[in-house]
Image: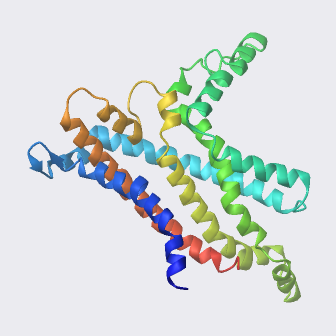
């Protein structure tokens, strides 16, 4: 019974994973290989088309840029937060805000940016009427692919704070004291201790941010109403198209491509975080 009870406790979680993650993923992938004529691998040719390669390239580019920029800004915030008292009001407010803003996405986030820096947004109108600055002089960038960078950074930076702050807090004061005792300075400490300890956690957090941006859909769907610049929007276009089952098969193959990318990224994330956890125990 002592061995059985913990297993039974995991039953609701396992059922949730199977019903809402595993089964939908299998159905989505299967739709790319099964049609009216049965099983076929012809749908895989979609992955080699120019439009698909362009969509994957755009998704990878947006995800990589927002992950790196969000990771660097978030790491600086983590370093600043680590110097604050753990129970201090500022530290608690930033921690709480990061937890909330990391999940603030989708239509709400898109509406917030449209109301703020949209064509008729508050900031846009103020800059245009009061200072003569038109941020849309070169085009309506907010509603195209470049417009995804700012909204994505809005939730990437808080997510970096949540994931990377424990690694920064795990740095021990006696490590720097030991380096100083051996005659080393701050440069030697960071080169031989600080950076090697934080590197796995930092790279793992970057991969998590990359996966978060790569799989985001609702924010991009609310901002970009035309075109399919990234893979999630291309899947949407295939599902709502009017050409029948072939488009459903296309969506399934695109979903397979996304899942393969996510599997590689999350495997790397798991290995890096397992290595980083050795220094946080």
The answer to whether 106 is drawn above or below residue 14 in the figure is above
Report the residue at 45% width, 65% height from top: 14
Report the residue at 63% width, 45% height from top: 103
Report the residue at 83% width, 49% height from top: 93
Q: In this rendering, would 238 be left or right of 232?
A: left
Outermost front residue: 1
Outermost top residue: 129
Give how far across and how far down residue 186 sits, in percent: 83, 74
Give how far across and how far down residue 206 sits, in percent: 58, 58
Number of residue marks: 0
The answer to whether 136 is drawn above or below residue 272 in the figure is above
Outermost left residue: 37
Q: In which quarter of the image is residue 191?
A: bottom right
Q: Quadrant of residue 138?
A: top right
Give how far across and how far down residue 35 sits, in percent: 15, 44
Q: In this rendering, would 50 be left or right of 148?
A: left
**Viewer-closest of 85 and 175:** 85
Report the residue at 84% width, 86% height from top: 178
Which quadrant holds the C terminus? bottom right
**Viewer-closest of 167 and 87:** 87
Q: In this rendering, would 215 be left or right of 108?
A: left
**Viewer-closest of 117 and 134:** 117
Give how far across and how far down residue 267 sits, in percent: 46, 67
Q: How is the image coloured?
A: rainbow
The answer to whether 126 is drawn above or below residue 239 in the figure is above
């Amino acid at each position: 019974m002592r061995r059985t009870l913990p297993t039974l406790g995991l039953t609701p979680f396992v059922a949730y994973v199977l019903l809402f993650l595993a089964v939908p993923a299998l159905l989505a992938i299967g739709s790319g290989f099964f049609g009216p004529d049965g099983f076929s691998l012809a749908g895989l040719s979609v992955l080699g088309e120019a439009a698909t390669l362009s969509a994957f390239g755009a998704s990878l580019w947006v995800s990589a840029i927002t992950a790196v920029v969000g990771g660097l800004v978030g790491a600086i915030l983590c370093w600043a937060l680590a110097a604050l008292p753990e129970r201090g009001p500022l530290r608690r407010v930033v921690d709480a805000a990061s937890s909330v803003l990391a999940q603030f996405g989708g239509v709400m986030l898109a509406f917030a940016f449209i109301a703020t820096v949209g064509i008729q947004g508050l900031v846009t109108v103020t800059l245009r009427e009061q200072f003569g600055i038109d941020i849309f002089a070169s085009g309506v960038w907010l509603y195209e692919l470049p417009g995804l960078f700012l909204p994505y950074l809005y939730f990437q930076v808080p997510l970096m704070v949540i994931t990377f702050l424990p690694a920064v807090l795990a740095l021990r004061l006696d490590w720097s004291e030991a380096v100083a005792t051996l005659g080393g300075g701050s440069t030697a400490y960071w080169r031989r201790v600080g950076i090697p300890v934080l590197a796995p956690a930092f790279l793992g957090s970057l991969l998590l941010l990359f996966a978060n941006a790569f799989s985001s859909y609702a924010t991009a769907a609310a901002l970009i109403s035309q075109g399919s610049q990234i893979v999630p929007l291309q899947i949407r276009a295939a599902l709502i198209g009017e050409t029948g089952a072939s488009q459903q098969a296309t969506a399934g193959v695109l979903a397979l491509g996304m899942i393969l990318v996510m599997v590689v990224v999350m495997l790397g994330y798991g290995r890096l975080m397992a290595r980083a956890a050795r220094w946080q125990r």
